[in-house]
Amino acid sequence: MRATVLVRPKPGILDPQGQAVESSLRHLGFAVAEARVGKLVELEVEIDDAAEARVQLERMCEQLLANPLIESYEIELRDDA
Amino acid sequence: MSGDPERPLVAVACFPGSNDDRDAVSALERVGADARRVWHDEPELPEGTAAVVLPGGFSYGDYLRCGAIARFSPIMRAVTAFAGDGGLVLGICNGFQILTEAGVLPGVLRANESLNFVCRDVRVRVEEADTAFTSRCADGQDLTIPVKHGEGCWFAGEELLAELEANGQIVLRYAPGENPNGAVDDVAGVRNATGNVFGLMPHPEHAVDLLLGSADGALILGSLVDAARLSSAALV
């Protein structure tokens, strides 16, 4: 199965990268009130069962892909087979 | 075992991308340690290790998050177990990042507020002199030690911060007006609850001789070696 994991800075956590992007977009003339920058991880997991894949992906996020102190994550799963 | 009981064995863990390991060894030797580099894929620390230093650098290219990958190195399993048994562990810069990612030290290190890499001397204040890492300092003493990092903005939520403050775990703060990275409450270095693990963003190993601008870093490394000597003697 293929999965996309989105990792975001938690609300209220200062995101200087997002602020720099926001400011640059404003300089370009775009009406942007806020930008937040996170990460996107694309994975191909060797598990056929969607429920099991989701359990494994949750673990991946907790153990490595996100730092729960400052980041939240969202998992999108799809079966391309 | 270490050959000379007066020179406690300090293991300096090296990861792919560490770049301050040699400076750390040299500085530790200078303040009285028998310091040895240990490669990251070693499953065990050398026999007789009295303290561990995790040096600065860019372990594993700082991929994903600084320190996030290094924490899974075989040597880190040994270091975490060593720390769990009360062993002395000092994390400098990237070493500090690894220890927070491993959950051994509280908080997290994020991109500097300015988004700039900062490389300069800073003044830091010793908030707690009664630790294994600051015993050669006095409470409130200012030390001049360089920082060089892009991701040194220490962060903890209000609740955790209050808890650390109450437990005396905030060992070092940037002096007023000196905060180079936007760290919450000017925190430059924290220890764990049991006091045997300490991490800081400034580089004491780069400040052990006046020729380098300051010898204040030797107070921190010297304190560690003093404590290592005691724990080493207790082992015999």
Image (tube, rainbow, N blue to C red):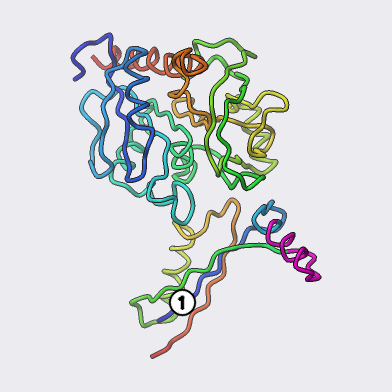
In the image, residue A18 sits, relative to residue B34, either above or below, namely: below
Closest to the observer, A27 or B24? A27
* Residue furthest out toward the bottom: A81
Find out whether residue A22 is within the magenta segment. Answer: yes
Q: Which corner quadrant holds the C terminus of chain A?
A: bottom left
The amino acid marked with disc number 1 is: Ala
Q: Residue at x 56, y 54 (%)?
A: A68
Q: Is residue B65 above or below residue B160?
A: below
Give how far across and how far down residue A8 sits, in percent: 61, 62
Q: At 57% from the left edge and 25% from the top edge, which residue is drawn?
A: B121
Where residue B213 sits in the image (x, y, percent)?
Answer: 52, 17
Q: Quadrant of the N terminus of chain A?
A: bottom left
On whether residue A28 falls in the magenta region, the answer is yes
- Please tell me how crowded label 1 is: few (under 14), some (14-19), or many (20+) other residues with Cα within 10 Å: some
Q: How many marks?
A: 1
From which residue to which does the magenta span run? Answer: A20-34
**Residue B166 position by quadrant:** top right
Q: Write down the quadrant of residue B147 in the picture.
A: top right
Chain where mark 1 sits? A
Front residue of this view, candidates A50 and B6: B6
Q: Is residue B86 above or below residue B234?
A: below
Q: Where is residue B220 shown, x and y percent of the image?
A: 47, 18
Query: Mark 1 = which residue?
Result: A3
Helix, strand or loop at disc 1? Answer: strand
Left-right relation of B17 to B143:
left
Residue sitting at x 57%, y 70%: A74
Residue B210 pos. (x, y %): 48, 12
